[in-house]
Image: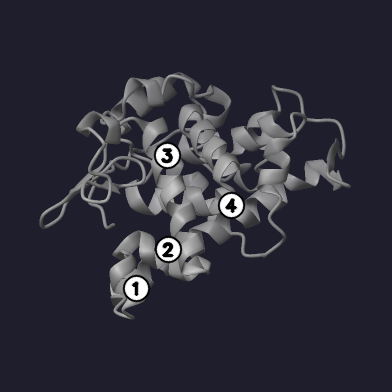
């Protein structure tokens, strides 16, 4: 499912949080209001390009503990806030995480897929020959014939179908690479050993972003918690709310103009 979309690069000044609402209305004017209304100012202070650049900076490969921390009430908010920073929408972050939990899909993979498909734009549209890809996970009109057009643009519904479909592809393919190939090119082409090169490039981009998400999470969020015998405990006192914005992202301190 390839996609076309428009994303405006807007100059950003970290020192002026008062500009945040206007900035996001301008950059994401194609988003639905419901997808934006729950953004927290302390997290949207990080410009998307700056935050996502940081995601791709860290290259370690630690064990993924995202779902474990999300499922525990004590640590859930830190996980939601992390992905809110990534998507710049609390509503999108909560929807994707909830369905990752339901369908046993690694959140890092689901968020990477949504980024590759739509850049987290619930209104993204791509017209193919004979079909249309729409919404957050670029659901194809032929693959989901029973969905009404407005359903595709409902971020929560799109996330539900997209992540459920990803789970199905992963199970059918038997591996992450095969599952992503099926999500992008369809099961028929992949099973016939006719996966196009552009799909292999697509998989590489998704996995690179997934790795970046996991690496940044492991450095900035996971160390705050101790997981033992299926339970989660705080590793230390959390930063106060006034310190939260940059305390979790030391690489940004003094780095923005």
Q: Position of residue 133 (x, y in %)?
A: 23, 48
Indicate the colouring scheme: one colour
Residue picked out by circle 1 = 190
Mark toward the viewer: 1 or 2:
1
Q: CA distance from mark 2 to mark 3?
A: 16 Å
Residue picked out by circle 4 = 106
Residue picked out by circle 3 = 159
Check disc 2 and report its element: helix, strand or loop. helix
Which badge, 3 or 1, comes first in the chain's sequence?
3
Check disc 1 and report its element: helix, strand or loop. helix
Quadrant containing the N terminus in the rendered view: bottom left
Would you say the residues marked 3 and 1 are in contact, meaning their CB atoms lie under 8 Å apart? no
Q: Position of residue 113 (x, y in %)?
A: 43, 53
Name the residue rendered at 31%, 25% in the picture.
32
Q: Position of residue 199 (x, y in %)?
A: 33, 69
Q: CA distance from mark 3 to mark 4?
A: 14 Å
Does residue 51 appear left or right of residue 229 in this picture?
A: left
Which badge, 1 or 4, comes first in the chain's sequence?
4
Mark toward the viewer: 1 or 4:
1
Viewer can see residue 132: yes
Does residue 199 appear left or right of residue 226 in this picture?
A: left
Which badge, 3 or 4, comes first in the chain's sequence?
4
Check disc 3 and report its element: helix, strand or loop. helix
Q: CA distance from mark 1 to mark 2?
A: 10 Å
Which badge, 1 or 2, comes first in the chain's sequence?
2
Mark toward the viewer: 3 or 1:
1
Label drawn at residue 162 = none
Name the residue rendered at 36%, 46% in the picture.
137
Check disc 4 and report its element: helix, strand or loop. loop
Which badge, 2 or 3, comes first in the chain's sequence?
3
Q: Residues within 10 Å of mark 4 (few under 14, many from 20)?
A: some
Which badge, 4 or 2, comes first in the chain's sequence?
4
């Amino acid at each position: 499912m390839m996609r076309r979309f428009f994303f405006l690069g807007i100059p950003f000044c970290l020192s002026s949080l008062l500009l945040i609402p206007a900035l996001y209305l301008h950059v994401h004017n194609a988003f639905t209001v419901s997808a934006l209304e729950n953004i927290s100012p302390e997290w949207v202070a990080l410009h998307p390009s700056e935050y996502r650049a940081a995601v791709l900076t860290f290259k370690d490969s630690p064990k993924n503990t995202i779902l474990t921390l999300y499922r525990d009430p004590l640590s859930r908010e830190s996980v939601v806030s992390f992905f809110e920073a990534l998507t710049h929408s609390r509503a999108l972050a909560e929807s994707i995480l909830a369905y990752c939990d339901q369908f046993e899909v690694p959140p890092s993979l689901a968020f990477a897929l949504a980024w590759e498909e739509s850049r987290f734009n619930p209104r993204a549209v791509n017209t193919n020959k004979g079909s249309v890809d729409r919404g957050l996970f670029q659901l194809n009109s032929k693959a989901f014939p029973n969905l009404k057009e407005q359903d595709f643009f409902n971020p929560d519904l799109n996330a539900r179908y997209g992540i459920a479909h990803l789970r199905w592809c992963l199970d059918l393919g038997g591996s992450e690479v095969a599952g992503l190939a099926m999500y992008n090119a369809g099961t028929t082409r992949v099973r016939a050993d006719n996966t196009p090169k552009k799909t292999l490039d697509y998989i590489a981009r998704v996995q690179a972003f997934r790795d970046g998400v996991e690496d940044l999470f492991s450095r900035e969020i996971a160390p705050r918690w101790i997981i033992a015998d299926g339970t989660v405990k705080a590793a230390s006192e959390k930063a106060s709310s006034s310190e939260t914005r940059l305390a979790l992202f030391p690489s940004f301190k003094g780095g923005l103009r």
